[in-house]
Image (spheres, coloured by chain):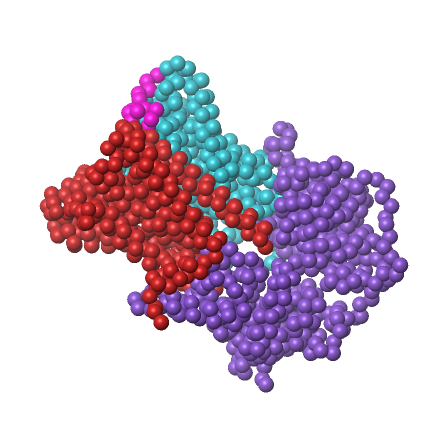
Chain colours: A red, B purple, C cyan
Amino acid sequence: MSNSPEWLNFRTLFSLSNATRFIQVAESLGVFALLMIVVIGASIIAPGFFTYTNLSNTLITASITAVTGLGMTFAIAMGGFDLSVGSVQVLTAIVAASLLSAVDPPLSILGSLLSGLALGLVNGVLISKLRLPAFVVTFGMMSIVRGVALLVTQGQSVMITRHSEFGLLNNGKILGLPVPFIIMMIVFVVLSVLLKHTPFGRHACAIGGNRAAATVSGINIDRTTIAVFGLVGVTAAISGVMLSSQLMIVDATLGTGFELQAITVSVLGGTSLSGGHGNLVGTVFAALLLATIASALNILKVISFYQYLALGLLLIFALAIDTARRAFIAKSLLSRA
Amino acid sequence: MPPILSLTGISKQFPGVTALDSVDFNLLAGEVHALMGENGAGKSTLINIISGLLHPTAGKISLAGEEVIFASAVQAQKAGISTITQEFNLVPQLTVAENIFLGREPTVGIGLLNWGKIKRHASEVLGELGLNVPLGQRVSYLSVGDRQLVEIAKALSMEFRIITMDEPTAALNAGEVARLFEIIERLKRRGIAVLYVSHRLREIFQIADRVTVLRDGKRVDTRRLDGLTEDDVVTMMLGRALKKEAAIYQEIPVTEKAALSVNNLTAPGFVTDISFDLHVGEVMGCAGLVGSGRYELTRALFGLLRISSGEVKINGRLVPLNSSNDAIRYGIYMLPEERKIEGIFPDLTVRENLLISAKRLFHRLSELLINVDEEEKQYQGMRNSLDIRAASSGQKITKLSGGNQQKVMLGRALVSSSRILLLNEPTRGVDVGTRVEIHAAIRKLARSGYAIIVSSSDIPELVSVSDRCLVLSAGRTKGLLDRAQISEDNITALAIGQEIRSDN
Amino acid sequence: MDLSETANRKVNGHAYGMSALGFLTRYYIQFLLVISVVILALVNPYFRTVGNLENILLQASFAGIGAAGMTLLIVSGAFDLSVAGLLGLCGVLISELLPSLGVVLTVVAALFFGVLLGLLNGLVVTKLRIPAFIATLGMMNIYLALAFIWTQGSRVISVSDPSFNVLGTGTWFEVLPIPFLIMIATYLVCYGILNRSVYGRCLRAVGSSEIAARTAGLPVDLIRILAFAIVGGCSALAGVFLTAELSSASAIMATGYELTVIAVVVIGGTSLKGGEGTLFGSFTGALFFAVISSALNILNVAAYWQYVVTGIFLISALGVQALRSYIVVE
């Protein structure tokens, strides 16, 4: 009897009734279709979009957003979210860049990830042990971490001068694909396994779906909360490392609006704010979508502020769809009962 | 065979009220034991004690011969007692299999879920229950009946020895009820004890082996069901025999337009095809057990529940009731059943809670500011008529006792400018003396130009206050009694599904 | 519990009979303000000057005016994170209209515009049923983007109309800046709304229990939308004074405004759960923040500490609130 999770996942997938499978696939399919449309559209109206260089760059941009977006999706599935990821990203980028002047890349990356983890754990502890609302706590942390970043750099930029091979993290290619994309795929696989195939991930979803049921089942809500926020911190740090590798010169003003992007790609990808499940595939598609739109607009020399506008509108749009979908499900359940 | 669960001398005191008085109770393995009694008899308290949600003030609990004390519901669960209530302990976004194993998932290797074991065990358990639901189906897509069965499967998988079911058939259709009973039979064969709490006599006789009847916190008797009749059980519940009077259905001559005219009203999932006329000056009672749709009917009439078909006319005019705003505009006001959840505003004062609906917001420009004197007068008026005990009108409402909070809620309905009042459980928590005054006040109000519906689970209250009484059962009208026919026994009989003999 | 005893306690005033800890948690911001002012005045001579006092009052009024409206909104159970963008957009509008419309009309137009944007926020939150903080986060981006587009970059537009700028720099009695006086007026109006009007009672009801509000027949959506409109109006008003004081406007002129305003409200003692709020607390909170800001400046502490300090204050204030509700329960 095989205990391979992969194999049985397929079986379980096939044994789903048509209705469920349809809805679940449709959630990801919607964004995927939108993505295809935009990619095709971009190739047509934006000359130079469909070149190797441009596609690589688009993939890189998407990957940086997607990594944190994946972490955010995890948090939203648990019923919370983290407004501090933008500040954490910039601080960990600064940490990575600063450490590089003293140690080798592997150690500096480790330092950066650890600092992201620490910040995430602080969030988790404040929210669970002190029972403070996630929104305000991470809102406050957003400001504190940004302030620390400013203080540490004294408003100056940090340039990566030693270990220029660090830039390979951004420029290197494996099998023709940009390294950041590979990193993102690894994060995607790891988080997917965590979310769907470990008790930890199932518990996080349970907390988001029905907190009372989770408590009664003996799940340790505090521990899971702290761990999830720690995870979000780590993903923000990975994004930070990728960012510093991309720019090779970082300062504390970067990353503003990043938390908005991360939330947008999660919700756009099909993850509902009400919690209980997380659509990681959708998040990746949505990140690609956002990056494609940005790339196309860049080529068309559309002012970047219109992109800003588009981001805000997209978020509102995605949230409205989420609301409509929840209302639809509620109504159809009522008629079935 | 020694009982699997044994309660001896269990008492439970709340401030001012004795919920349970030295109750002895035992449960045998493999039996279905029904627990019956009127509202307030102590059933819920007993179940909460068994499932660990409450601690008894006296007495002891023994599980398989050993004495136990449950510090919490989680502990009771660990000891093998499962409680299935209306609000399921399932996570809607997770699959059936995941819900069954929530909190105790088997893992393999570095911590990955052992799907093989999960699938095997879950299929086993579902197979035992004869449940055909696909394991990978999200619970949110299941019907209420199926969800309940998943909960039972979860209980089974956790090797529970005792399963408590509280009004399990309230939300099920006939087919699902039959399936549930089949499953209960299987549970019996497995040696599991089922504690079955319900009002529905017919079902109890179908499924239970023994029945324990509580009355006023005391155990009346525990008997085996074979050899008993329905009347015997009802006698135990009420303390005397049910007198079913011969009923003559008389038509009340309709002399004027009805204040409220309801025709074939259906709110899907809750009530079906309800019709009645309500006149000014009249108090109509509305009776029915849990799940009868009694409360939902008033919510539908107040615009809070979707009406799929049927029409509502006020003073002869057809009105749409799509929101509570609509209802208020057309002159209907409702007193909700659960004041803690949907009634009081905990941060506001007594006066504010009383007068929150007195004026429609922005209805008149002259009424933008609060006129403290006028409001204080209104408050004093209500305080006197209802005998509200509060230190001052500026006190926070949470400082008042439950009964007084209820009076404030009632006052809120009375000061609204609506002439059609839907009062749910108007005297819940109120002491006997004031209750009589409130009933008198309701009758007086009706005579002075109101049309009032009193929906209540307290049958004596309905008897003392109603001119006519509508009785609902399973979402449909079971009977509409006129003044001559209103009696505790008639209402009870109709509510539990029996027929009243009619001489005609 | 003897009800008559409780009556006596209440009649004689809040402080009477309340535990010391309870009193402290209720009025801590007032204590903090007084203590910090006293300490700083003793320690630093510059702090004691009239010029500095005037500056503090001026700085306090920007966040303070916004906090008045935000207090009302939070009491109703919602938040508005878009105020920084809203303010910036209003500032840009002012810079465009001032040359042609003159001071009075421009101010009126700006306020009107702010209210309009607030209504838009309210509609998005109530009609699309999106949680307030996420919806307003998105709206913030939209407003900022619109302001950027309008100014073609974060180009700073100078606004130099002396009769307008006096709004920001003018003072009464040499010490009270005009914005501060307007702030007092704003707080009086908001106090009236919250505690003396029917609408204010509805606001508190919605924040206390939305379900009960719907069951009682209150028009919850309308009540919410109006609260957002009030926040929009207050932000626009603050924008008028900020533009006047800076003599310029840009899209990012108010970056971090939402953080400061919400921190002021929270530290002032208004609970984030809604249902009750203290405008006096927000007023004091605004002054307190201005004092701390000024102190950091005088002590030559880097401006970057602002962010850290604000965030720490916010989280600590939450902790105090949690403590207070714990005490009340027990």
Q: Residue furthest top?
A: C100
Q: In this view, does B350 lie to the left or right of A327?
A: right
Q: Which residue shows up at 85% across the image and 43% down it?
A: B254
Q: Where is residue C13 in the image (x, y as percent from the top left)?
A: 54, 46
Q: Against B139, is A39 above or below?
A: above
Q: Which residue shows up at 55% across the image and 43% down it?
A: C206
Residue C262 vs residue B285, the one in the foreground = B285
Q: Can residue B239 be seen from the camera position used here?
A: no
How many numbered callouts? 0
Q: Which residue shows up at 84% across the image and 57% down it?
A: B485
Residue B180 vs residue C272, the one in the foreground = B180
Q: Can residue B372 be seen from the camera position used here?
A: yes
Q: Which residue shows up at 11% across the image and 45% down it?
A: A164
Q: Position of residue B350 (x, y in %)?
A: 62, 47
Q: Assign the N terminus of chain A to one quadrant of the image.
A: bottom left
Q: Residue furthest left?
A: A162
Q: Assign the C terminus of chain A to one quadrant of the image.
A: bottom right
Which span of residues is magenta-colored? C148-162
Answer whether residue C158 is magenta in the image. Answer: yes
